[in-house]
């Protein structure tokens, strides 16, 4: 494998030089590629083509090797974590599938806010303390009251991930029990590769009770996490890889997206935030480039996908320092070929598809929402575009029939969403609950305020 990678690197450098590319770069600044030279277009160009074919063949062979999970042909990943592992793992199945991995088994041992010390206590007492969340068919299933030991022994995991509770992730003294966890897991799963999920710093305006430990400073928290991982995790030879999710999120915060990647100040946003974490996690473990992942959640349009891919790539290359994004200018939506859809707003109320088709204007929190009318696919055809202002979110409620639904879609905070066939799937009707990201009351707002914050553009006929 090392020989193949070395050949690829040498051939890549040759191609860049031959094409007149600028190969200069500095730490935390990804290489910029120029345009191909038009000089010596004859024999030299044919030579370059042959060389490129050889390079592509080597890349294909390397990718095939990466896509061979150890032993049984199934990529198996277990995380021992908390809500931050939940955020990280949400899209990993879909990401892996779109990258060419056919067989996947994911597990997540979950306790909200769980620290290393609590994991150690549970391991020592063999306590049935976890929600065990699994995914082997593109759907998460939960089994409560699960033991860590049973989950570890249930599969021949390729990778087992550990992490610290977010509030303690930058406090080095809280890592004293890491060696016990490493020894415990390795005894039960000696052939599994142990990885460390580096968590992310809180949003700058977060109200988390642990934020004062870092003087309520996002950058101080991020740097503290880096120091703790470098001093307490990297020094342990049993750790196969560190997944730099903390850096990937920090990278994305330098883009036009800004400091908007959480849904509550610390848990990642349900679309872009979780996507970045899942992309970084999967690609760090497998070596597959984020550019080779074709999947993105509905809330992540092509421009946001570019931010996610860039942030993940730069974090993987430079895991212990922020790389500033090149995507600093927010794309401007050109509405010249679209017309604005009438939302048919009901002020101060919301849909709840799990109870049927009706707008709740009675429950105490109804004042925090504004509901749209009910839409069909004919109303919002594929190719329509949803535009959302900063500080707002919406839940795209969905029905397959007129009755109560088994689940509800998550809230979306992405600024732009292009309606696709996958967005409609097999739904017959959809509607929107519009609210502020901070959950505050909308009682003093007008319909004009809502129409300015949430817009749906449909293609002109």
Image (cartoon, helix red, strand yellow):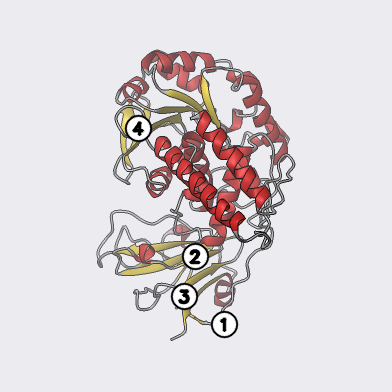
Q: Give the x, y percent position of residue 376.
A: 34, 74
Q: Earlier in the sequence, mark 1 or mark 3?
A: 1
217 relative position to 145: left or right: right
Give the labeled residue for mark 2. Answer: 417
371 up-or-down from 124: above or below: below
136 relative position to 19: left or right: left
Q: Count neighbours of disc 3 (C-alpha within 10 A) and say few if under 14, some if 14 to 19, many if 20 or more.
A: some
Q: Nearer the viewer, mark 3 or mark 2?
A: 2
Give the labeled residue for mark 3. Answer: 345
64 relative position to 259: left or right: left
How far is mark 2 from mark 4, CA to CA?
32 Å
Please, what secondary structure does the residue beneath circle 4 have? strand
Is residue 206 among the parts visible in the rendering? no
Q: Give the x, y percent position of residue 421.
A: 36, 66
Q: State the quadrant of the C terminus.
A: bottom left
Please, what secondary structure does the residue beneath circle 2 have? strand
Q: Earlier in the sequence, mark 3 or mark 2?
A: 3
Give the labeled residue for mark 1. Answer: 336
How far is mark 3 from mark 2, CA to CA?
20 Å
Give the labeled residue for mark 4. Answer: 132
192 up-or-down from 166: above or below: above
Residue 180: numbered disc:
none
């Amino acid at each position: 494998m090392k020989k193949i990678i070395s050949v690829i690197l040498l051939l890549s450098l040759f191609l860049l030089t031959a094409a007149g590319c600028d190969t200069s770069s500095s730490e935390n600044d990804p290489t910029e590629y120029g345009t191909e030279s038009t000089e010596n277009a004859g024999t030299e160009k044919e030579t370059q083509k042959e060389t490129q074919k050889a390079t592509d063949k080597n890349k294909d062979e390397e990718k095939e090797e990466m896509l061979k999970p150890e032993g049984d042909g199934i990529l198996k990943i277990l995380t021992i974590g908390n809500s931050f592992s939940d955020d990280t793992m949400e899209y990993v199945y879909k990401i892996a599938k779109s990258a060419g991995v056919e067989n996947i088994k994911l597990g997540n041992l979950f306790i909200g806010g769980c620290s290393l010390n609590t994991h150690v206590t549970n391991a020592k007492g063999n306590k049935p303390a976890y929600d065990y969340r699994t995914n082997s068919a593109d759907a998460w299933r939960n089994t409560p009251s699960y033991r860590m030991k049973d989950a570890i022994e249930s599969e021949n995991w390729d990778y087992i991930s550990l992490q610290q509770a977010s509030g303690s992730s930058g406090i080095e003294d809280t890592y004293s029990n890491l060696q016990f966890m490493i020894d415990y897991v390795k005894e039960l799963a000696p052939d599994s590769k142990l990885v460390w999920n580096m968590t992310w710093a809180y949003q700058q305006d977060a109200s988390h009770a642990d934020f004062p430990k870092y003087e309520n400073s996002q950058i101080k928290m991020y740097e503290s996490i880096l120091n703790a991982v470098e001093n307490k995790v990297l020094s342990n030879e049993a750790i196969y890889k560190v997944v730099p999710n903390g850096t990937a999120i920090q990278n994305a915060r330098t883009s036009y997206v800004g400091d908007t990647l959480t849904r509550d100040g610390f848990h990642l946003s349900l679309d872009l935030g979780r996507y970045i974490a899942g992309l970084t996690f999967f690609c760090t473990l497998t070596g597959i480039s984020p550019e080779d992942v074709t999947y993105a959640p509905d809330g992540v349009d092509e421009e946001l996908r570019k931010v996610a891919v860039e942030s993940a790539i730069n974090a993987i290359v430079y895991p212990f320092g922020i790389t500033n994004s090149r995507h600093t200018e927010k794309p401007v939506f050109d509405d010249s070929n679209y017309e604005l859809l009438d939302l048919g707003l009901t002020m101060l109320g919301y849909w709840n598809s799990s109870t049927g088709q009706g707008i709740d204007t009675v429950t105490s929190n109804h004042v925090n929402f504004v509901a749209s009318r009910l839409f069909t696919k004919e109303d919002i055809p594929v190719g329509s575009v949803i535009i959302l202002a900063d500080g707002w979110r919406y839940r795209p409620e969905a029905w397959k029939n007129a009755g109560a639904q088994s689940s509800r879609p998550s809230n979306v905070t992405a600024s732009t969403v292009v309606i696709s066939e996958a967005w409609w799937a097999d739904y017959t009707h959809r509607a929107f609950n519009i609210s502020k990201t901070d959950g505050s009351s909308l009682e003093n707002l007008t319909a004009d305020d809502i129409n300015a914050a949430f817009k749906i553009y449909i293609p002109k006929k």
